[in-house]
Amino acid sequence: LAKTTQPISMDSYEGQEVNITCSHNNIATNDYITWYQQFPSQGPRFIIQGYKTKVTNEVASLFIPADRKSSTLSLPRVSLSDTAVYYCLVESSGSARQLTFGSGTQLTVLP
Amino acid sequence: DGGITQSPKYLFRKEGQNVTLSCEQNLNHDAMYWYRQDPGQGLRLIYYSQIVNDFQKGDIAEGYSVSREKKESFPLTVTSAQKNPTAFYLCASWDSGRHQPQHFGDGTRLSIL
């Protein structure tokens, strides 16, 4: 299982774009990169998943360079409700689908 | 509306007592998982099950037991052998036939009296 490294915490202001970068140097060829969001006392929620280049959905974008050793989650125009812990995971495409969660990045959005 | 239901939301255990946490899903997912989360930490895998009547230990299985008699249900028992059971417990499920993310319940917080 590939290990990920991401910043422990980040602060931002409402309306700004936030970029959280994750490094995963030993990612395997068949691995996907997935980001989850977790609020206190709730289960993680899926945000976005990608394999390479750029993926965009209604809440975020995910940028993955060609070497795939890192990825950047981009949250456009954050609001106070985006304050949460964000986890970057490298998911194996194997059948066991074990996930390794690091400590995540605590994003605090300030007014 | 499909999802994962964990109950109870809060649970208290006396010393030496076994307690069982419930996890039910109506997503028709084959695989189910139990994670433990301690304050300020990520999730650690306790047990997982890929099919009915089969399950495997995760990274921290000692002091826990599970069963998978039905596809929809994956209860976790925290036994008296688990010396530090106070934590937030999360259940998840996954459709093993497609490349989709895991779906999580909203957790059970277990405390020791």
Image (cartoon, coloured by chain):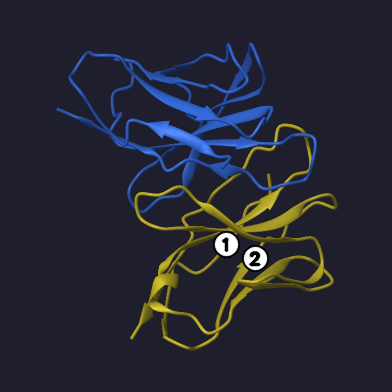
Chain colours: A yellow, B blue
Kind of residue at disc 1:
Thr
Are the residues at dot 1 and dot 2 in contact (C-beta closer than 8 Å)?
yes
Q: Is residue B43 above or below residue B84?
A: below
Q: Label 1 crowding class (10 Å Cα cut-off): few <14, some 14-19, many 20+?
A: some
Is B109 positioned to the left or the right of B53 in the image? left
The quadrant holding residue A94 is top right
N-term mark: 1 or 2: 1
Place of residue B64 in the rendered image (x, y in percent of width and height, measured from the top left): 42, 19
Place of residue B2 in the rendered image (x, y in percent of width and height, measured from the top left): 58, 40
Q: Is residue B31 above or below residue A49?
A: above
- The quarter in which the C terminus of chain A is drawn is bottom left
Give the residue drawn at x 56%, y 42%.
B1
Q: Nearer the viewer, residue A86 or B92?
A: B92
The quadrant holding residue B87 is top left
- The quarter in which the N terminus of chain A is drawn is top right
Name the subunit of mark 1: A
Label 1, on which residue?
Answer: A5
Q: Label 2 crowding class (10 Å Cα cut-off): few <14, some 14-19, many 20+?
A: some
Is A107 positioned to the left or the right of A58 in the image? left
Q: Nearer the viewer, residue A76 or A89?
A: A76
Give the residue drawn at x 59%, y 31%.
B26
Separation (CA) of disc 1 from disc 2: 5 Å
Place of residue A76 in the rendered image (x, y in percent of width and height, measured from the top left): 58, 82
Label 2, on which residue?
Answer: A23
The quadrant holding residue B12 is top left
Give the residue drawn at x 74%, y 65%.
A69
